[in-house]
Structure formats: C-alpha cells, structure tokens
Image: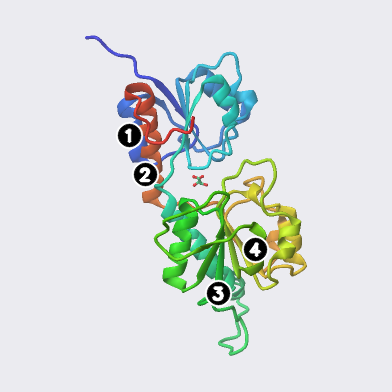
Amino acid sequence: MNRIQKPEIIVTRAVPDAVAKALTDHFSVSLNLNDIPFSERELKQALESADGLICTVSDQITADIISSTERRASIISNFGVGVSNIDVNCCQKLGLVVTNTPNVLTHATAEIALFLILAVSRRTTYSETKLRNNCWKGFSIVEDLGVSLAGKTLGIVGMGRIGQATAEKVINSLGMKVVFFNRSPVKDLSFRAVQLDTLAEVLTCADVVSIHAPGGTKEPILKREHFAMMKKTAFLINTARGDVVDQRALINALKTSLISGAGLDVYLDEPKVPNELFLLDNVTLLPHIGSATCETREAMGMLAVNNLKAHFFDGNYPSRII
Ligand code: DGY
C-alpha cells in the first residue's frame, strides 16, 4: 500500500479532545497532555523537529527561536487571535507562515469585558471577599454601594471586532452611550456610537474605558498622562493585552485615586500579577479567561487545525496573518 507521510505537528499546550482528534485525522501529532508550557529551548526544538507548530499566547516565539538554522517548520498556527507572542516581522523575513483564530472568540471576550464593567462598577469583588471572609454584618442601606451605568458613557479604545461586540452588548444590556477612538474611521456600525478624533477626547468624557487594541507595540497606548485625563470616577477595563497599558502607571493611578477602579483579564508579564493589585479592593482580576468557554476553545482549535490543513493540503487559509 502506498502510505503518504502525514505532516508532523507539535502542539505546545493541551487542547480540547475534539481538536486533538481533528488533528490526528490529518497529521502525525505530538500533544502536550500534561499542559506544562514549553521552555524557550523546547519551543526551538519543536520548530526544528516538526513541519508545523500549534502554539498559543503563553508561548513566546522570539526571533532567536524562529531564526534557528535547523528550523524545519514552515507554519506557526497560533491558538489565539492576538499574535503579540510571535515575532511576526521575523517570520515574514524568513518566509514562515503565521495564522491565528479571529472571530470565533469575539463574543466570549466581549462577555468578559461586560462582566468586568459590571464587577467594578458594583464593587462585587470587594463585597464577595467580605462575605467569603465571614465579615458581612447583614443588609445595609449605605454600605457596599456601587454606581449605576444607565445613561453613562463607555469609551472604547480600538473599535475592532471585540470592541464592537462589547459596545453592542453594553448598549443593549446596560443602556450606556458609546464613544470611541480608533486610528482609522469606522463606518456602518449596527449600533449608535460616536467616533471621536483623539484618544484624549474619549478618555476625558468616558465613565468606563474599555481597551480593545492588539498588543505587541513598542509603547503602551495608555500611559501615566492618560490616567490623569480620565475622570476620577472612571473605571478601566482591559481584556486585550497587558502591554497596551502601562501597568505601573495604572497601579499608581489606582493607588492615588486618579481613577476609581479597574477590571483586568490580562497583565504585562503573565502569569505574574503584581502583588500591589491583589491588595487593592477597587479592582477585579481574572486570569486571562476572555476566550475561555468550552465552545470557544473548541472553535479556536478547529480554526487552528483548518489553518494547518490549508497550509499543507489546499492553500485555502481561513485566517492567515502572513
Ligand atoms: C487571544 O486569542 O488573543 C486571547 O487573548 C486568548 O484567548
């Protein structure tokens, strides 16, 4: 029998069973069943020993790793929409294909943004901690008060797919108004939102600022001077990437009451989270779970598999970055 050699794929982290099955149907696969993240050396070895790699946002695919003269892999299929973990410029120079998993996680991530907006405005982390520590003394008319959101203004920074889904959910469920800053004009929105010319305009008028910009840029988008522009009563929500916000400046803004609180799902040097954040009772902190639903993770995985299938079999990539 004429056996055709299947392309060899290494998967850096544990994936849903259905995704593993779809992979093994088409590829010779090495799975990471114990889910321990690969070291830099293991990532390099993976690119040297397989035809393709499925990696994710926790794998730093640096120029050094990609540039190995022994590299065999011709594709990095990222399990995630953001590719700030990959040196895409270097991949481009070396002709290495990079794909990602957009769209399928839009609503899950927007739901987490919505959750964080509610959590910080109603101070649920503070209240729940009090309850869990057996410190609740019973119903009070004047304690545990948050702020109402109806009629207030949400400022979106980065009106891409997730920014739009967040805006729409917030308008429909909370009755907030939406303004936004986006580098290019955004037209034909299916909901009412006003695009402002500058980031500063959005920051000065918003009661809640939610950032939805890709990470991996040289400088954070929100820096010290930006927190000074925000209302003292405002909240910051970040479900994008830790590096889009100057984390030190954010902590200072929270400690000095420049802003009222923050809801964070992402951090600068994950999985490290500065202890100072744990000590603040005006923040809600989540461990990068924006896309963490069973349905979404399976859909992301299938997209990562389909990108590999396109690369090796038919060239019809669902989502190729370069
Ligand atoms: C992504 O896909 O970029 C998310 O941050 C991980 O779910």
Q: Between 51 and 83, which is closer to the camera in this rendering?
A: 83
Q: Which residue is mark 1?
A: 21
Residue 41, position as x, y percentages in the image: 62, 25
Secondary-structure class at tag 1: helix
Secondary-structure class at tag 2: helix
Q: Nearer the viewer, mark 4 or mark 3?
A: 4
Query: Cβ of disc 3 within 8 Å of ligand 1?
Result: no
Q: Which residue is mark 2?
A: 299
Secondary-structure class at tag 3: loop
Q: In the rendered structure, which disc, 4 or 3, sits on the residue that comes first in sequence?
A: 3
Q: Is residue 100 left or right of residue 120?
A: left
Residue 143, position as x, y percentages in the image: 62, 84
Quote the CA–CA distance across marks 1 and 2: 13 Å
Quadrant of the rendered structure where residue 136 is?
Answer: bottom right
Q: Nearer the viewer, mark 3 or mark 1?
A: 3
Q: Nearer the viewer, mark 4 or mark 2?
A: 4
Crowdedness near tag 2: few (<14), some (14–19) or many (≥20) residues, C-alpha within 10 Å: some
Q: In the rendered structure, which disc, 4 or 2, sits on the residue that comes first in sequence?
A: 4
Q: Which residue is mark 4?
A: 201
Quote the CA–CA distance across marks 4 and 3: 15 Å
Q: Give amino acid for label 4.
A: Glu
Crowdedness near tag 4: few (<14), some (14–19) or many (≥20) residues, C-alpha within 10 Å: some
Q: In the rendered structure, which disc, 1 or 4, sits on the residue that comes first in sequence?
A: 1
Quote the CA–CA distance across marks 3 and 2: 35 Å
Q: In the rendered structure, which disc, 3 or 2, sits on the residue that comes first in sequence?
A: 3
Q: 272 above or below 62?
A: below
Which residue is found at the position 34% from the left and 29% from the top? 316
